[in-house]
Image (cartoon, coloured by chain):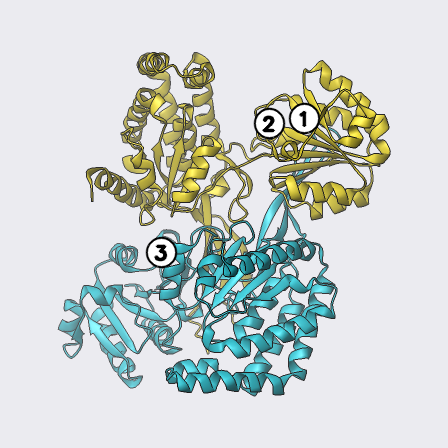
Chain colours: A cyan, B yellow
């Protein structure tokens, strides 16, 4: 075993041992630790900005894209968002220890399920250093230990944040190893981390698709992962078209770069003549390029023709594919074939259509008369989110504290025996 | 791509398409199909016994162990158990479509979670042909499609059962491809099946540890798997010793071969002098060999000395390791170090000890004053079980219908927009 593997295994062992202590921690202890971390960040702004400047200088030297430099930069505002987030998570309801689904069996024994932490959570992320704090907050509040692995371009900032976390943790009742940062930029570290099934219970990768795809191939530890968000809005024949217009515009233009942004608009043939010219002019105002199917282009001939690649594409840009469909069945068939199972919406006034869509569309979120851009843990009332999962098992859709927990069966008896 | 891979991919495609239909099926349709399958089994007993005889003849020829031949054999009783199981599963409450955790957000939109099928479930099992029917029943009732892969030693029996399933399905409203059997004994089929992430959502392996370990290495599809059941009973200083004796005897002797059988007994030092001689004579009556730690052997000198291998071993046999511990902390430390996180029990009259044990022992099932042999889906009130999961994510412990489902978010609004 090489040095790197040994270092990582040692981190894993410490995390596993810390996880046992974390599982016993009270909500008061965990919340106090989060407040303590927030206070330490408030008091260390100068040091943080200095460390961040080193990363920014290196970014300029390595000619990183302006968008990447932007994600890297700490400002007064990003620091305030971090500390506000910590204090918000501190105030959330602690899910750990709650008992659910309790039944009493005929022999008198009581069967319940207790919510417990997952254990050790590995977070692998890219340029945004705020993830160091956001992820740590959610993991600690849900009673887990975490191992953080940030992007090399944010190395100095993450090291400074890790130092603050360590200092703050030492002043709490929680084990200091409950949050550890992998302090190497060696890319092989990630490859080893995702195979440490003995110490790590789940990996949450936060980053671009290429990172996720790579981890999916390499990982032996389960991933809570986010892949594509190819989201659809279907305007039904029974839609209120004014409402449909409002929903479609918001779904596309709220923010182009989010995974809940609408990428394809499906329109029932019966309302296409009415609706498509309206959407064409509204999207033109927003500078959104439209790509239409053949029938769409008989109504709006100025549109670029859409190809199969457009149905498959997650643009994350001011581009929208438009298709006319003959029925709700065709709309659902299109979504099943081309969609990514992320978030899909129907606009309709017809209860049967709404009911069919919500039952039959197999996506992690299905909406009736709402824009797909609501796909977000805060909007769902989760208080905070560690990410949006496109897995089917365990956590699906926006993942809050509960997604970082599991359950165990707890049975109580008075000496009942079997058989 | 070779022929085998093509065949399996075609099975996967058909299953995926059937899964979409299954997700829409009503409970009445699914239950009727299960009753229909039971009826067809009742009417095909002669053909089934003939097919089974072929497997039994081959088993004798290949000199399989008597235990294996026994598992292979269909009798009037096993057929009746199958059909009774089908009718019981038919009568269970269908979890699909139920809405839970509904909240209304400040903007008026309603957020719920709807229970939906997992999709396509692969079941890989060994010699018991009844799994073909039991697994199909649970998958169908929970709205899933399934792909079955039985052991080669039960090939003819499984083919006959698959024929019955097909015949019965054709007389129902369900898609016939909702249950498919892989009709080849080529071992590479399993290797391909567990990598078909495009078509298969989860694999449930039912078999020995060597099968599970092999699949764990090869699989890219998530597994709901069962590994070791190294279960403990801890007799606390505040235990009612009569009750403790009854529990320990039942935990060990109810059935030696089940995963919930107690493998190590931990006894608090303060009650060891009283308790150990009693357990020694009771276990002797049952022909259970005891292996004790040093302190145990100062009290019961006739016992074989226990080594570290004994703490780690899942005997599944009339052998029991016995250790004296100084405190509940030492007992929990032993369980954390040597246990498999399956099922562990405390016997105590003290509420604080009970509360600490149920909170701090990180096993899929934790019992207070009950024998570990209760680890079973029927005993927990699940109605039936597809297996016992030693995973932390998704399903943990006994897995019933709900473990074969997932949830999706369903949001309803009246045209609310974001931002």
Q: Mark 3 lies on which chain?
A: A
Q: On the rendered image, what quadrant is the N terminus of chain B found in?
A: top left
Residue B308 in view (yes/no): yes
- Distance between the Cα atoms at labels 2 and 3? 52 Å
Disc 2 to disc 3: CB gap under 8 Å: no
**Mark 1 or mark 2, which is nearer the start of the sequence?**
2
- Mark 3: give few (<14), some (14-19) or many (20+) Cα within 10 Å: many
Choose top left, top right, bottom left or bottom right for residue B35.
Answer: top left
Q: Can residue A363 be seen in this view?
A: no
Which chain's residue wears label 1? B
Identify which residue is drawn at 76% across, 45% down.
B329
Which residue is depicted at the point 64% across and 40% down? B338
Disc ID at residue A357: 3
Q: Residue beneath label 1, please? A: B320
Does the residue at mark 2 contact the one at mark 1 (Cβ under 8 Å)?
A: yes
Chain letter for mark 2, please.
B
Q: Mark 2 points at which residue?
A: B315
At mark 3, the secondary structure is helix
- Frontmost residue, A85 versus B205: B205
Q: How far apart are marks 2 and 1 (CA)?
A: 8 Å
Asked whether the residues under marks 2 and 3 belong to the same chain, the reply is no
Identify the residue at image location x=72%, y=43%.
B332
Q: Position of residue B357 (x, y in %)?
A: 73, 44
Location of residue B12 with respect to B109 vertically, above or below: above
Tell me whether marks 3 and 1 sit on the same chain.
no
Q: Position of residue A205 (x, y in %)?
A: 46, 63
Of A371 and A263, the residue lying toward us: A263
Is disc 2 surrounded by few (<14), some (14 to 19) or many (20+) residues within 10 Å? some
Q: Is residue A165 left or right of residue A129?
A: right
> What x and y, as percent, mark residue B56?
36, 13
Up-down relation of residue A76 to residue B312 (above or below): below
Eyeballing the image, is A243 above or below A19?
A: below
């Amino acid at each position: 075993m090489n040095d790197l593997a040994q270092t990582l295994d040692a981190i894993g062992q410490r995390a596993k041992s810390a996880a046992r202590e974390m599982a016993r921690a009270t909500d008061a202890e965990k919340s106090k630790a989060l407040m303590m971390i927030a206070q330490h960040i408030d008091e260390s702004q100068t040091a943080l900005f200095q460390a961040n400047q080193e990363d920014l200088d290196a970014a300029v030297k390595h000619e990183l894209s302006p968008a990447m430099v932007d994600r890297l930069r700490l400002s007064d505002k990003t620091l305030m968002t971090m500390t506000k987030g910590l204090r918000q998570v501190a105030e959330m309801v602690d899910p750990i220890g709650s008992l659910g689904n309790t039944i009493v069996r005929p022999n008198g024994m009581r069967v319940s399920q207790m919510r417990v932490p997952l254990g050790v959570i590995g977070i692998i992320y890219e340029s945004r250093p705020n993830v160091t704090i956001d992820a740590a907050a959610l993991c600690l509040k849900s009673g887990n230990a975490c191992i953080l692995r940030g992007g090399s371009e944010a190395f100095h900032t993450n090291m400074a944040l890790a130092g603050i976390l360590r200092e703050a943790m030492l002043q709490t009742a929680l084990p200091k190893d409950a949050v550890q940062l992998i302090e190497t930029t060696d890319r092989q570290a990630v490859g080893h981390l995702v195979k440490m099934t003995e110490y790590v219970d789940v990996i949450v990768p936060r980053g671009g698709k290429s990172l996720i795809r790579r981890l999916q191939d390499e990982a032996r530890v389960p991933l809570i992962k986010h892949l594509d968000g190819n989201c659809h809005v279907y305007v039904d024949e029974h839609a209120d078209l004014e409402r449909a217009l409002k929903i479609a515009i918001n779904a596309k233009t709220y923010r182009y770069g989010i995974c809940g942004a609408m990428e394809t608009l499906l329109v029932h043939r019966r309302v296409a003549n009415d609706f498509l010219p309206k959407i064409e002019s509204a999207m033109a105002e927003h500078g959104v390029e439209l790509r239409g199917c053949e029938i769409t282009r008989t109504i709006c001939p100025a549109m670029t023709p859409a190809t199969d690649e457009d149905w498959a594409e997650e643009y994350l840009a001011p581009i929208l594919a438009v298709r006319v469909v003959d029925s709700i069945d065709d709309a659902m068939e299109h979504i099943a074939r081309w969609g990514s199972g992320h978030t899909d919406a129907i606009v309709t006034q017809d209860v049967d259509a709404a009911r069919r869509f919500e039952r039959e569309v197999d996506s992690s979120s299905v909406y009736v008369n709402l824009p797909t851009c609501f796909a977000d843990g805060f909007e769902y009332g989760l208080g905070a989110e560690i990410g949006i999962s496109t897995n089917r098992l365990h956590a699906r859709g926006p993942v809050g504290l509960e997604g970082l927990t599991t359950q165990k069966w707890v049975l109580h008896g008075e000496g009942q025996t079997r058989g």
